[in-house]
Amino acid sequence: MPALPSHCPDLSTLYLGAADVARIVERIGLRASLVEVAARIGSALRRWPEFSKVARTADHSRQGVIELMPTSDAQDYAFKYVNGHPGNTRLGLPTVMAFGVLADVATGQPRLLAALSLATAIRTAAMSALVAQHLARPDSRTMALIGNGAQAEFQALAFAEMLGIRSLRLFDTDPAASARLVSNLHGQGLRLLTCASVAEAVRGADIVTTATADKALATVIRPEMVEPGMHFNAIGGDCPGKTELAAEVLRQASVFVEYEPQTRIEGDLQLLPADFAVTEFWQVLSGARPGRRSAAEVTVFDSVGFALEDHAVLGFLEQAALALGLGQRLQLLPPLADPKNLFGSLAPAAVSAAMRPVLLAA
């Protein structure tokens, strides 16, 4: 290959593996990372009209779902690959696995390739707490956490840090999951009570977070469990045929969503007719629509995750990695002295070998 001229642009892509992302969070601190990601998401939501928006592309199977989530503003394009396979834990695999790319809109050059499994849990918790700051009662101190899987610790710490939650009432159909959660949250300044049922956990809670994993039209929360003033942070219903709240719970509440066209397909909202009124949360941040209007109002955040949140967390990871000197450089793109001469990226010997006939076994 010809030598590259000194002015040839840097075509390398910063790669952050799972260990790099974990080290970023360790260096910055998990609680501080949650707060920073929430601030970045809030800033992006206030620029909502500047982003391209489309419901994610989903490929469903009996075992789960694989999704692609793209968005961009005038500067940065981002997409995330993510799956959701509830049965994976029986195979020793995570339920959710993800990676993402951040690229320049002006040139299309990919700047960042990052593992996003940990970052997805952080951005989901950050978004949940950001929304709850506007929808939950300001005096909320007790949260029920229904579903104590991989998302649970992040949700607990985000709500503790950003809303002042001090007590957690826990329930999971798998007692070992609740025991793990209690162990992991030891020393975090939270009072933890493991409950025998959903109804027991929800009773008296100010905020109810549902983070169940089963791909089913479940009714984890029934109307008789709802108390005046509750805020429901429903994050587990995130694909067609997968819900957590009874339809009547939604009908009796003020419902807020990320991106309505996507939530109607994937969220608990799929249980209701298309004319059921909801509010996109960016409208609350912009002042166009109210959040909580009274202490007795019941509010629901029907969260399915949206690409703008991943756009924000990828920006966080890129800036943090550059500041901390983490990650490595990958050569995803061929360095070319002449950008029109892609053929020239092949060594002459390789070209000659490619032109020789190859005999395939019969």
Image (cartoon, rainbow, N blue to C red):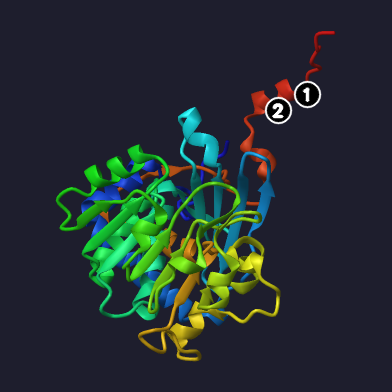
Residue sitting at 24 percent across and 49 percent down? 26
Quadrant housing the N terminus: top right
Residue drawn where x is 79% and y is 15% of the image: 358
Q: Which mark is residue 351?
A: 2
> What residue sits right under mark 1 in the picture?
355
| 190 lies above or below 138 | above
Specify whether 286 is left or right of 73.
left
**Vertical placement of residue 126 versus 255, above or below:** above
Three-letter code for the amino acid on which mark 2 is drawn: Val
Q: Nearer the viewer, residue 235 or 262?
A: 235
Percent across and percent down for residue 111 are: 48, 55
Amino acid carrying mark 1 in the image: Met
Quadrant in which residue 129 is drawn: bottom left
Give the number of callouts. Answer: 2
Q: Residue furthest right?
A: 362
User: Where does the image place residue 126, in percent across and percent down from the top left?
Assistant: 37, 64
**Disc 1 residue crowd, few under 14, some 14–19, many 20+, Cα 10 Å:** few
Tag 2 near tag 1, CB within 8 Å: yes
Q: Quadrant of residue 133?
A: bottom left
Using residue 261 as the reference point, say whether residue 78 is left or right of it. Answer: left
Along the line of sight, the residue nearer the viewer: 138 or 332: 138
Give SS at disc 2. helix
Q: Which mark is residue 87?
A: none
Q: Please tell me how crowded label 2 is: few (under 14), some (14-19), or many (20+) other residues with Cα within 10 Å.
A: few
The C terminus sits in image quarter:
top right
90, above or below 57, in the image: above
Q: Which residue is most to the bottom?
A: 288
Q: Position of residue 188 (x, y in %)?
A: 17, 54
Q: CA distance from mark 2 to mark 1?
A: 6 Å
Residue 337 image position (x, y, % from top left):
57, 47
Name the side, left or right, on which 236 lies relative to 107: left
User: Can residue 340 be seen in the rendering of this structure?
Assistant: no
